[in-house]
Image (spheres, rainbow, N blue to C red):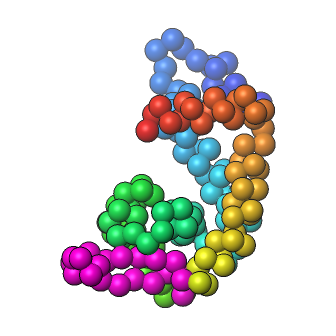
Amino acid sequence: MKPMQAAKEHRREDDYLLDAQIGFMLRQAHQRHATIFASHMIEDLTPTQWAALAKLKEIGPSSQNLLGRLTAMDAATIKGVVDRLTKRGFTRTKSDPADGRRLLVALTERGAALYERARPIAARITEHTLDSLNERERTQLMALLAKLM
């Protein structure tokens, strides 16, 4: 019996059931996805590192600040992600010629090659995460999540 079913059997009308709360359910879904990601992704990439690489491939060189906003990472997190990717040779940074206070981040050739190798794996990770949903349910889930953002 699933935890949600067990909780419903013992439910009173005024109970707060953790298993029925959106935050708890989203966290469990995220944990499942993170486990799938970690078991399949190459080069020990973390989800945040993959997000930065994928976004840089999508938009090209970017300020570190904008990259953080586009990947939903705060300034400290994106700085750490970029530092680790740069140390591994996947990104490079330089001062923005138009504004020396701004740091520009770009993929290196090695980073672009890693993206090409990891892209089909990332697609399979998504498929595996959503494997219990049919196509209509996947579309509906993505639309509903987009409304929450």
Identify the residue shown where x is 75% and y is 49%. 127
In the foreground, 51 or 76: 51
Q: Does residue 49 show up? A: yes
Q: Is residue 140 magenta?
A: no
Q: Main secondary structure of the magenta part?
A: strand
Identify the magenta region: 89-108
Spot occupied by residue 63 in the image (x, y as percentages of width and height): 35, 70
Spot occupied by residue 100 in the image (x, y as percentages of width and height): 22, 81
Q: Quadrant of the N terminus?
A: top right
In the foreground, 51 or 95: 95
- Say if 107 sits above or below 62 in the image: below
Spot occupied by residue 71 in the image (x, y as percentages of width and height): 45, 58
Identify the residue shown where x is 45% and y is 84%. 92
Identify the residue shown where x is 50% and y is 36%. 146
Q: Is residue 105 magenta?
A: yes
Q: Is residue 35 left or right of residue 46?
A: right
- Rendering quarter of residue 140: top right
- Rendering quarter of residue 109: bottom right
Spot occupied by residue 74 in the image (x, y as percentages of width and height): 34, 61
Q: Does residue 84 show up? A: no
Q: Is residue 108 left or right of residue 39?
A: left
In the foreground, 38 or 67: 67
- Rendering quarter of residue 98: bottom left
- Say if 113 sits above or below 36 in the image: below
- Say if 89 sits above or below 23 in the image: below
